[in-house]
Amino acid sequence: MAATTLTRRLAIEVGVAPVPACGATTTIASFPYTESFDIVPTGQARPCGVTVLDANGDGATWAISKINPNSGANSIRYAGLTLNNVAADDWFFTPALNLNAATRYQVAFRYRGEGIANSPSSYTERLDVTSGTAATVAAQTNVLYTNAAITNTSYALANGTSAPVVALLPASATTQYVGFHIRSAANQGNLYIDDLTISAVAVSATSEALLRAVSVFPNPSTTGLFDLEIHGANAKGRLDVLVTNALGQRVYTGSARDNYTNKVDLSSLAPGIYHLQVRNGSENMISRISILK
């Protein structure tokens, strides 16, 4: 009996559905895309479509780990060689992402270093998150996130409102890959990534810089309270904030600071869909926000 047939038969007998094998290509066209690194097909080293690159060829690279997941059974871990005197230079890439030019996309993930839980690690890790048209170093031309001081040993969230912030993917109608690049100094420790999510975000802007600088969280909000994170808008003064309802009527006006988490209180408004506009001189960004109560 073939091995795959036996695996499926045993899975049925114990009541567990077998994990399907990976296809020739894996392309993500439906969002949100989530990856918890828990579903690894039999005979595969990683989830379908996830690839790794040991760019410095030292044998230490990203691999699925059952140690210290944030959720489920697995995470993906870079296991450093603490005595090899070689700086980390290793990547893992998402599957191909089929993006719509009319939609923007936000990357979010959890990360932690090695060490005693809830204590700072004695090692410092550096991570860059990028995007590009291929799962290659040369193609990863857009930097979404850089954190050169990872010492936390409990999982932290990196997203559109974290510090550092994860920028939105550039406007594009092409296939993109997101790359995670560890480039810690030599003789450091381990870095874990878990619960990766790439979500579609309904935003538009007259300025790419403003689009990258502004994010709203949580969205939707169950209270009507929002954090308006603005980072790197290069504003000379305060930015104008305007919220309109579905009829185009103004329901909120205010101002916000650059490089600051601004509070927007819409708790008095009825549940529904609204449009939040941020203006920096002649530039503006519009994001659809939702209130659920």
Image (cartoon, grey):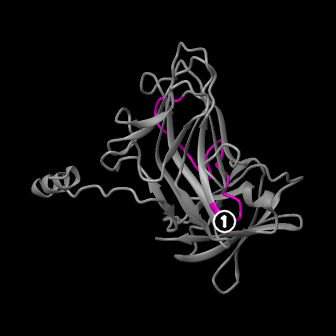
Vertical side of 46 occupied by 221: above or below = below
Of residue 282 and residue 205, the one placed in the foreground of this image is 205
Q: Which residue is mark 1?
A: 174
Dot 1 crowding, Cα within 10 Å, few <14, some 14–19, many 20+: few
Rendered location of residue 100, percent (x, y): 63, 71
Vertical side of 1 occupied by 185: above or below = above
Q: Which residue reaches farthest bottom?
A: 247
Q: Residue at x 51, y 19 (%)?
A: 81
Is any atom of residue 286 visible in this view?
A: no
* Badge 1 amino acid: Thr
Along the horizontal axis of the image, is 217 left or right of 242? left
Residue 213 drawn in magenta: no
Q: Residue at x 74, y 61 (%)?
A: 211
Rendered location of residue 108, percent (x, y): 55, 51
- In which quadrant of the rendered view does residue 285 lie? bottom right
Q: Residue at x 60, y 58 (%)?
A: 106
Rendered location of residue 284, percent (x, y): 80, 67
Helix, strand or loop under label 1: loop
Rendered location of residue 261, percent (x, y): 68, 50
Is any atom of residue 268 visible in this view?
A: yes
Of residue 155 and residue 181, the one placed in the foreground of this image is 181
Q: Which residue reaches farthest front?
A: 1
Q: Which residues are magenta?
A: 152-175
Of residue 162 and residue 267, the one placed in the foreground of this image is 162
Along the horizontal axis of the image, is 102 left or right of 94? right
